[in-house]
Image (spheres, grey):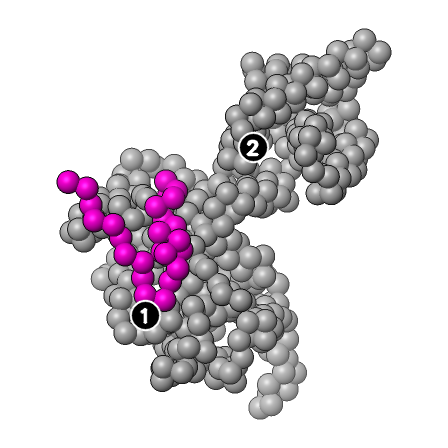
Amino acid sequence: MADPPTRPQIGADEWVARSAERSAAGRARTWAEQTPAPIRYGALAVVVTLIALVPVMTSDEYILRVGVVSLIYALLALGLNVSVGLAGLLDLGYVAFYGFGAYGYALLSSSKFGVHWSLWETLPLVLGTSILVGFLLALPSRRLVGDYLAIVTLFFGQIFYTIAVQGYRVPLITFHGTHDITGGPNGIADVDDFRVFGHHLTTNRAYFWFSLIAVVVVFTAIHFLNESRTGRAWRAHRDDPLATELMGMPINWLKLLAIAVGASVGALAGTINAASLHGAFPDDYSTPVLITIYAMVILGGAGSLLGVVLGALTVNILLEVLRTPDHARWILYIAIVVALLAKVRPWRKLAAVLAGTLAFGIAVHAIVAAAWPRGVHGLVSISGTDFSNGGWFGWALRHWLVLPAHTYEEGQYTWFNVALVALIGLVLVLTMVRGWVRWALLVPTLWLAALVWETRLVEEGTGPTRFLLLGAILVVLMAARPQGFLGTHRVEIV
């Protein structure tokens, strides 16, 4: 027997209320929400168990370290999701609480001042102080919303970073001269390990399990908080602050509480990071780190606890994979194909674009080979100093692109500069044309994008290239699914 039709929600348009029925992702989300709670929790328990087995299945320190960092980012994403995803506050000073936890633990449990408090003495003080600082930050800005709140919190984050960098020459009233508090650009080293129930956590394996337990505890706490009256009030404030205030909810208190809760989670992540690295260093708590955390929350789906954890794991693991040029090369071309599959319709148009791009490259390669044989004898980059034929995929690239012999081995990137300027020009033109002209120009644009990648960007996988590629992947994913992996569509009435 067919299921009875779903009634539209009160105050929501019927088309909007049934929007989830019109996409595979929406139907999957609806199915997941209708699954009994014991089954959902059981599935999460199985996933957590499998993750906990990672240190047992491998002894590779690099993999374990990536796992620890990924779990720390998951904590950070959960904390930021409280203020941004649940309460709808644009908090740009969140990374300061991350650094506050790290430096707080480093000052109280290191050789910096000869203080070696245990974890259970330091952690409550650091978390309690971070909550207080969060309240103090939110108190003067409780009446601010949107861009105004973002400016105030961003200023707070920058103040923290400046103090961390310049804190090696702090003048104190009761003493003469200046004093080193934060270690300046060099940070604070020789930070104590965590001591848990008489055991010293000295390995990445131990910190992996500790971080996983912290993620599970924080996830569970925020889940129950989200299901409480406070969580419902946060979501109401996120959707419509004015209506929330008119209903008599204390919106100022909700803002204070959201920022304070997020601050405590960020500080917890900072203590784990400082202990696992045996130090606290200012560049780990700067604005680029904040941007990365925001990318994780947005990718996973702001407001979804499971989504932001998935986004954190995806972004950090992807950044590590992109360090290897060969892996980054595969990810780039797969991302391009996926983007074309998602956006180009009908199918015959997609087939035409792919076939045209392939034919265009082969034709250009043949013309250059006939006119200038040396212009097509180049090798593909395996690393910054290693070039080779690249196997069957490298052979295909060398016969599709134009790679001059010895140009990149010698570090002369004239072709890269020319191709980059041409690519930027074509992208600008694509934004201004429509119809068949756009589809025709898409062919050389794709070919030039591959040429720019192979002639220089692939060599800098450990530097800015991986962030550029990550940004491009995020743009593609956001264009295909603006609400993120597990986020929900938000309809605003203007």
Using the rendered image of the protein, determine whether residue 284 is visible from the camera's viewpoint: no
Earlier sequence position, callout 2 versus callout 1: 1
Label 2 sits on a secondary structure element that is: loop
Q: Which mark is residue 231?
A: 1
Q: Is residue 436 left or right of residue 101?
A: right
Q: Quadrant of the N terminus?
A: top left
Q: Is residue 4 magenta?
A: yes
Q: Who's the residue at 77% across and 24% down the image? A: 407
Label 1 sits on a secondary structure element that is: helix
Q: Is residue 126 above or below residue 352?
A: below
Label 2 environment density (alpha carbons within 10 Å; few <14, some 14–19, many ≥20): some
Residue 472 x/y as whole percent: 59, 42
Disc 2 marks a residue whose amino acid type is: Val
Q: Is residue 167 above or below residue 428?
A: below
Outermost residue toward the bottom? 174
Q: Is residue 169 above or below residue 358?
A: below
Residue 480 x/y as whole percent: 50, 43
Q: Most prominent secondary structure in the magenta stretch?
A: loop
Q: Who's the residue at 30% across and 40% down the image? A: 54
Q: Is residue 129 magenta?
A: no
Q: Who's the residue at 36% across and 56% down the image? A: 14
Span shown in magenta: 1-25
Pick whichever, 15 or 152, lies toward us.
15
Residue 396 x/y as whole percent: 61, 15
Q: Are marks 2 and 1 in contact (CB under 8 Å)?
A: no
Reading the image, the residue beneath label 2 is 344
Residue 410 in which image quadrant: top right
Q: Is residue 227 left or right of residue 374?
A: left
Outermost residue toward the right? 371
Q: Nearer the viewer, mark 2 or mark 1?
A: 2
State the CA–CA distance, disc 2 to disc 1: 40 Å
Residue 277 in which image quadrant: bottom left
